[in-house]
Image (tube, rainbow, N blue to C red):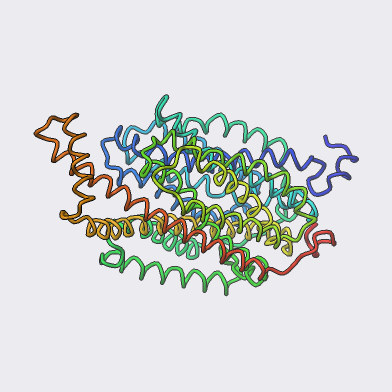
Amino acid sequence: MISAAKRAKYPLTEGVNPWLIAVAVMSATFMEVLDTSIASVALRNIAGSMSASVSEATWVLTSYLVANAVILPASNWFALRFGRKKFLIVCVIIFTFSSLMCGAAPTLWFLLLARVFQGAGGGALQPLSQSILMESFPPARRAAAMAAFAFGIVVAPVLGPTFGGWLTDTYSWRYAFYINIPIGILSVILISRFVHDPSYVRNAKVGKFDNIGFGLLAVWTATLQIVLDKGQEDDWFGAMWIRYAVVVLIAALGLWIYRSWTRTDSLVNLRILKDHNFRTGCMLMWLLGVTVYATITLLPLYFQEVMGYTAYTAGWVVGPRGIGAICAMPIVGIIGNKVDSRKLLTFGFLLFFFCAVYFGRSNLGIGPTTMLIPIVVSGFAMSFVFVPMSTISYTTLKNSEMGNATGIFNLMRNIGGSVGISAVQTMLERRQAFYQTQIGASLTGTSGKVQQALHGLSAYAGQKMGTANGGEGGMAMMYMMLQQQALLSSFVVVFRWVALLSIVCAVLVWTFKKNDLSKAPPPGVH
């Protein structure tokens, strides 16, 4: 039994220290986010062991993201209907058991089905964890709470590629899923012990499940993810099926927005977007998803595709970003309630800008440690962006609105991430083709420099392959160098676009209204 003294000390959590709650819910969120980035590293190994192409194996990611995106905004209804604590525990159990099934999958189709269930279980973990954290701390301490939440959201995607690469290379890709089992068991124990439903959740009366709204949500999120994932492969609107898919997407999204805005019994209440700061936060969170996910995707690809590193080595090179994020969290937690959140956000986005500019000046002569400082600084910037953005976006909302708000907020980040990854892949492929043509046109056979370089390469290839094959080997080596330079140039362009987008975000930050967290919270928060 919890004593009266503890209940008086921690009235928002029924006498439980809110930091124990933070540890409980963050264990679940960390597990879910870590698994997403781990699986991406193991795609080639999954494809090889199941006799599938890499393109087919990408559905391992897509199937998870679709199920995840569908559940995200619907999580609030399930939490109010069945109880938030029970629903959170059930989601962790589903995610953990599905992880076991993913690791034991004998075929690709079995793995895809398991990933759908895993995505459904994992979809609610982030919004539920965030809403529980926001309600467990008074408004004046929410910056510290969000710093704890940022540990899972920011650090896990950084550790994932390194840890996933090590598990895959040392043991098997299956252990990238098995690792969730002990974490899931620990999470269930901690949540059962420390998390309690507030009175508004225990006494909530929700209407019937919005089948039509859920169906529209499933259609537009699934269609969007499939179009973004496969668009570049089929030349976007050059493919008839993408044209039809976009029509379905627009129709389903329009109907879902109309229903969610006009009906009081809809699955998702979009009228919460009337709150200025929350609306601004959703827009910036979408842009943050585009920027951050694009950067996270770019750097490992850069080191693997341009520099020729293995997935494991590339993971170690980009891993120090987590060090920067961890160093920044206590700083943000301490000053988050003392400094205007807009200033912290501007500082974070400007750091992103300078890091992207530095990345955009890279060349083929860099070593593994050349980008160490900007990689660490980019992780530092993540905490200075994510924490104050979450704090200022939720400040004017009531506790009873948190569940609905966190579902929408996390959905915007996920969609922004999907758009960012798709845009990066498209730009890289198309700019590489452009630069390859441009550079190739300048390599004329009559050029003295070209002839000299080709002669040297042919002589080197002749030593390795024999004199008779030296000429062809030299030409092949020159073509590979051309491709490498074209790919480098395309990465430079994309990094510069990320820099530009960071400046746009830094300007848009000032559309937030300043909030004084030291004042009493709005009615209904406690």
Q: Camera-side residue: 512 or 112?
A: 512
Q: Quadrant of the N terminus?
A: top right
Residue at horizontal 78 percent and vertical 62 percent from the top: 524
Measured as percent of width and height from the top left, residue 202 is found at 71, 51
Q: How many marks?
A: 0
For the C terminus, which image quadrant?
A: bottom right
The residue positioned farthest toward the left in the image shown: 468
What residue appears at the point 59 percent right and 31 percent down from the top-left corner? Answer: 185
Front residue of 315/82: it is: 315
Residue 39, placed above or below residue 385: above
Q: Residue at x 41, y 40 (%)?
A: 114
Between 304 and 11, the one lying in front of the other is 304
Q: Position of residue 314 (x, y in %)?
A: 44, 38
Q: Which residue appears at 56% of the width and 43% of the height?
A: 91
Q: From the viewer's perspective, is 236 left or right of 450?
A: right
**Quarter of the figure with residue 90:** top right
Q: Where is residue 73? Give x, y as percent.
A: 55, 58
| Residue 303 in the figure: left or right of residue 140 | left
Whether residue 511 sits left or right of residue 104 in the image: it is: right
Query: Quick check: can you spot residue 445?
Result: yes
Q: Residue furthest top?
A: 171
The residue at the far right in this view is 5
The quarter holding residue 307 reads top left
- In the displayed structure, 122 sits above or below 356; it is above
Question: Can residue 98 be spotted in the picture?
Answer: no
Residue farthest to the front? Answer: 448
Q: Where's residue 248, x and y in %?
A: 37, 68
